[in-house]
Image (tube, rainbow, N blue to C red):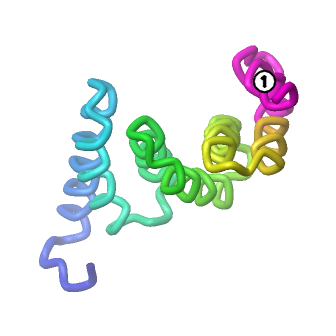
């Protein structure tokens, strides 16, 4: 992306527009389509956890669990106290067959946000399986 002719301000606006477009598609349930602008935004800003989290959600909801796992792992790496990223990573790990990893991240999510009953519910479901 170093050959982009845009000014830094134009580039930031372009990336934000990509993120916003992807987020809107995600909200409307068009998960596969949402991944396209979010992937483009990630190419420009690979360290932006908001972009990676949204892309992970798009992948997860479209059944691409291995890609979702990778995106959520990148978010957790950059923001280790992001409870939602741990929760989503745990769910993606479960879907890709890594129950041990799933339990670990679901436990972390529940510990970071003990008020979230859904986190505890998924953790209990994984322990019961």
Judge whether residue 128 is colored magenta. Answer: yes
- Picture coordinates of residue 109 (x, y %)? 76, 35
- Picture coordinates of residue 50 (x, y %)? 47, 47
Name above or below for residue 63 compared with residue 119: below
Name above or below for residue 21 compared with residue 113: below
**Image-based side of 71 in relation to 118, left or right:** left
Residue at 12 percent of width and 78 percent of height: 5
Element at badge 1?
A: helix
Residue at 30 percent of width and 26 percent of height: 29
The quarter in which the C terminus is drawn is: top right
Q: Quadrant of residue 82?
A: top right
Residue at 27 percent of width and 40 percent of height: 20
Q: Quadrant of residue 24?
A: top left
To which residue does mark 1 refer? 125
- Picture coordinates of residue 12 (x, y %)? 27, 59
Out of 11 and 33, give the one closest to the viewer: 33
Out of 3 and 100, give the one closest to the viewer: 100
Magenta span: helix, strand or loop, mainly?
A: helix
Q: Which residues are magenta?
A: 109-129
**Image-based side of 44 in relation to 73, left or right:** left
Residue at the farthest bottom position: 3
């Amino acid at each position: 992306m170093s050959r982009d002719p845009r000014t830094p301000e134009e580039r930031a606006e372009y990336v934000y527009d990509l993120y916003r477009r992807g987020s809107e598609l995600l909200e409307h349930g068009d998960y596969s389509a949402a991944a396209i602008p979010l992937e483009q935004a990630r190419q420009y800003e690979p360290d932006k956890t908001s972009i990676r989290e949204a892309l992970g959600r798009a992948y997860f909801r479209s059944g691409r669990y291995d890609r979702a796992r990778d995106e959520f792992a990148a978010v957790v790496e950059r923001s280790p106290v992001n409870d939602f990223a741990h929760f989503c990573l745990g769910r993606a790990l479960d879907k890709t067959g890594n129950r041990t990893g799933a339990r670990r991240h679901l436990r972390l999510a529940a510990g970071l946000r003990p008020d979230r009953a859904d986190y505890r519910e998924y953790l209990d479901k994984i322990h019961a399986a």
